[in-house]
Image: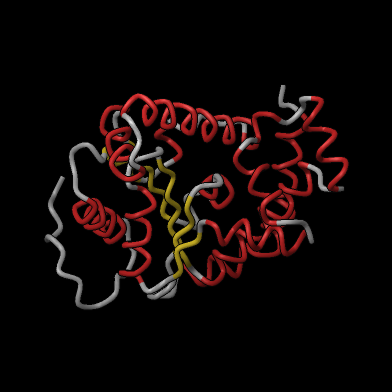
Amino acid sequence: MKCSTERLIEGLIRAQMSEYQHQLEQKQKEAQHYVVTVSRGFGSQGKEVAQLLADTLGVRCCDRYILQQVSKLAHVDEEFVAVLDEHVSKVGEHWWDTLMAKKSFSLEDYYHYLVKVVLSIAQAGGVIVGRGAHMILGPELCFRVRITGSLEQCAQRIADREGVGIQEAEQRVIETDRERAEYIRVIYGADIADSGHYDLVLNSDRYSQEQMLEMILIAMRDSGYVLPEGLALNPTKGV
């Protein structure tokens, strides 16, 4: 039996979809309208690849922008929304309930505005990073990518980027990935690692950012997307 939060988010999505779905489906038929979601492991280079993809497709890469728009619609501080966004697994603890009450901003409010923002981005076209956008939009309205990597490789990238020791970097990767997985579980009742929720899953241990970009573009093209002219991609290969 689904918990109340799962039923709530499903209801919110259905309500918003009834307003936007027809418009989104029409836009998806247009050659230059692209909506891609990128789920990523911490240190997997997912954000970097998402930005490269957005630049290539000529659309906006939306990450922090989502929090900015949620806070704007809800009339609450962006930093508070960021705390909720990053620590959703703490919802239900006494100190968290007290904090939420003081801000007059509930988890249900967050769900509501998150769905509105994701659907608004989808209308305009964009590459949406994280926040379970792939669960909101589904395969009909977006191309869904997940980028992963081993703990060792992801931690090494974090250590190099942030100038910390490898053990601290490994702990950061473990904790961040755990929080992201919990976010998807709490809000959508889903497993972030379930490949059935994605159209393409890439292991960043094996490929460079540029190679991952090309594989995403090829997969999009072979799925029926009409890509911008002038892209030099490998020819379609038979299966």
Q: Position of residue 175 (x, y in %)?
A: 49, 28
Q: Position of residue 215 (x, y in %)?
A: 23, 53
Residue nearer the viewer, 58 or 42? 42
Picture layout, residue 226 above or below residue 192: below
Q: Quadrant of the N terminus?
A: top right
Residue nearer the viewer, 166 or 181? 166
Q: Position of residue 71 (x, y in %)?
A: 71, 58
Q: Quadrant of the C terminus?
A: top left
Q: Residue furthest bottom?
A: 229
Q: Residue furthest top?
A: 1
Q: Position of residue 53 (x, y in %)?
A: 33, 62
Q: Is residue 48 left or right of residue 115?
A: left
Residue at x 38%, y 65% (from the top left corner): 54
Residue at x 62%, y 56% (from the top left corner): 67
Tell me how the rendering is colored: secondary structure
Residue at x 56%, y 46% (from the top left corner): 131
Residue at x 63%, y 48% (from the top left corner): 82
Q: Is residue 149 left or right of residue 180?
A: left
The tally of labels here is 0
Picture layout, residue 169 above or below residue 76: above
